[in-house]
Amino acid sequence: MTITRFAPSPTGYIHVGNLRTALMNYLIARKNGGEFILRIDDTDTERSTQAYEDGLKADLTWLGLVWDDTFNQSKRFGMYDAAADKLRDMGLLYACYETADELDRKRKIALSRGRPPVYDRAALNLTDEDKAKYEAEGRKPHWRFKLSGERVEWNDLVRGPQSIDTASVSDPVLIREDGSYLYTLPSVVDDIDAKITHVVRGED
């Protein structure tokens, strides 16, 4: 069964770009006799408000884009913590202690030498003693997902065959220094859990 989702953040009012994405997901689900899920991406607890969430739902209802199910990411942190722990156990999520200034310096050095500003994975070589020293300095780690370094291929229903060489991009940060999650990990966990079959979103 086709299952799509629209996943707005309740940090402001809905706009035309949001509505376009919502409409495409709604129409694909309805055309195929599937389900349209509304996921509220409210992991940014400081900026997300109930008033904005209520406004999003009211606007979608007024437009006739009625959803079959809905849930809030802020209620699912336990699932994200479990996924992060599993990735750590698999050796796919590793702690990094570079500051923003140090990372910026690395990027500038790489660019000045004509190389792409890809993270050098220096954190993978840290010993327990190194980590303890950083911790003693008051540094807290951010956590990166270790990419395979291989080419990944998939078929996009709009663009056709697509691929990317994962060695050409930096290992993405999934968890910030303060322990909060970036969009990437919660989104993937939720898409798998909700059995989303088609991800239709803006090209941003």
Image (tube, rainbow, N blue to C red):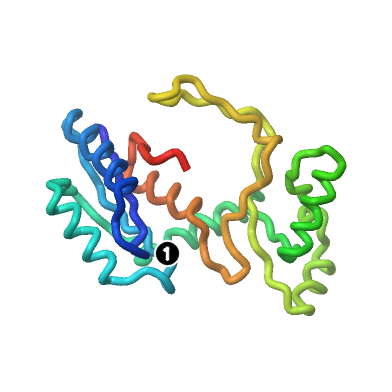
- In percent of the image, x 39 and y 25: which residue is there? 158
Q: Mark 1 points at which residue?
A: 43
Report the side of 166 relative to 186 (left or right). Answer: right
Residue 38 point in image, percent of width and height: 26, 51
Q: In which quarter of the image is the N terminus?
A: top left
* In the image, residue 195 above or below residue 161: below
Report the side of 177 relative to 27 (left or right). Answer: right
Farthest residue in the top direction? 161
Query: Which is more toward the observer, 103 or 194?
Result: 103
Residue 156 point in image, percent of width and height: 43, 26
- In percent of the image, x 65 and y 41: which residue is there? 147
Report the side of 106 relative to 95 (left or right). Answer: right
Farthest residue in the front direction? 16
Query: Which is more toward the observer, 192 or 32?
Result: 32
Report the side of 155 relative to 126 (left or right). Answer: left
- Write down the quadrant of residue 152 in the picture: top right
Q: What amino acid is labelled 1 in the image?
A: Thr
- Write down the quadrant of residue 110 in the picture: top right
Query: Which is more toward the observer, 177 or 131?
Result: 177
SS class of the residue under badge 1?
loop
